[in-house]
Image (cartoon, rainbow, N blue to C red):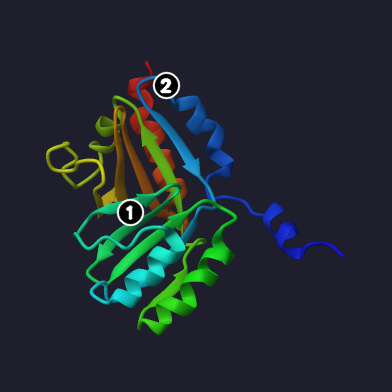
């Protein structure tokens, strides 16, 4: 009997698959643009002051949710982004989704919270390089200077009129992860390709 889960995954198409080659072609030593498709994304709601909630999250992800506003924490290849006083986004590699959600749902619910699979809601675009910030500053309303937006920060903002969560993950070179709704991903990627063109010269 065929593995339905495997067959379904083989049929998946990421929001940016049709223009992935253009992002690669635009990339240069100054700035690169890549999609990380199908990353597991789980929305978490709960009370971070409750030990049971923190234990449930840490047991599944290896790290408790950050309490400081607009920050992100990492544990290996997993990360948790602060989105609000009682809201976070847990992110992990593809293929961990069902297992990770299963580990979170019950314990988080017992602690009075909720864990919801949001994987299909957004895709992730990574913009990196010495001129990555220069590209983003062309259309971002948030101050991205390192003094205002250091590594480890995350913010909900607009880029090219698209609502995103923007996370800074590195300094040398500056690296940013853009979490954008699937329905806006193509528009944002096209904008990034255009904005990065001058740095490829």
Residue 150 at x, y percent in the picture: 20, 41
Q: Which residue: 30% across, 36% down?
A: 170
Q: Are marks 1 and 2 in contact (CB under 8 Å)?
A: no
Secondary structure under tag 2 reads loop
Q: Which residue: 33% across, 54% down?
A: 164
> Where is residue 86, by image quadrant?
bottom left
Q: Nearer the viewer, residue 45 or 24?
A: 45
Position of 151 relative to 68 (above/below) = above
User: Pointer 2: residues within 10 angstroms few (<14), some, or many (20+)?
Assistant: some
Q: Residue furthest left?
A: 147
Instruction: Say whether residue 62 is visible.
Output: yes
Residue 142 at x, y percent in the picture: 18, 47
Position of 177 relative to 165 (above/below) = above
Instruction: Say whether residue 160 is visible.
Output: no
Q: Which residue is mark 2?
A: 28
User: Pointer 1: residues within 10 angstroms few (<14), some, or many (20+)?
Assistant: many
- For the N terminus, the quadrant is bottom right
Q: Which mark is residue 164?
A: 1
- For the C terminus, the quadrant is top left
Residue 3 at x, y percent in the picture: 78, 62
Position of 98 relative to 52 (above/below) = above
Residue 23 at x, y percent in the picture: 48, 33
Secondary structure under tag 1 reads strand
Q: Nearer the viewer, residue 118 or 81?
A: 81
Q: Which residue: 12% across, 38% down?
A: 147
């Amino acid at each position: 009997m065929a593995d339905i889960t495997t067959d379904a995954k083989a049929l998946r198409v990421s929001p940016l698959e049709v223009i992935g080659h253009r992002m690669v072609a635009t990339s240069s030593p100054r700035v690169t643009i890549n999609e990380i498709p199908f990353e597991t994304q789980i929305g978490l709601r709960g009370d971070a002051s409750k030990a049971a909630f923190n234990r449930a999250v840490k047991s599944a992800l290896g790290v408790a949710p950050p309490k400081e506003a607009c920050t992100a924490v990492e544990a290996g290849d997993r990360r948790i982004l602060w989105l609000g006083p009682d809201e976070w986004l847990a992110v992990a590699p593809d293929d961990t989704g069902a297992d990770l959600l299963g580990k979170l749902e019950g314990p988080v619910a017992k602690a009075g919270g909720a864990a919801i699979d949001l994987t299909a809601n957004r895709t992730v675009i990574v913009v990196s390089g010495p001129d990555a910030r220069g590209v983003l500053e062309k259309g971002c309303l948030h101050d991205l200077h390192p003094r205002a937006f250091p590594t480890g920060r995350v913010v909900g903002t607009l880029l090219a009129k698209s609502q995103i969560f923007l996370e800074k993950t590195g300094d040398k070179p500056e690296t940013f992860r853009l979490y954008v709704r699937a329905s806006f991903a193509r528009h944002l990627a096209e904008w990034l390709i255009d904005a990065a063109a001058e740095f490829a010269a």
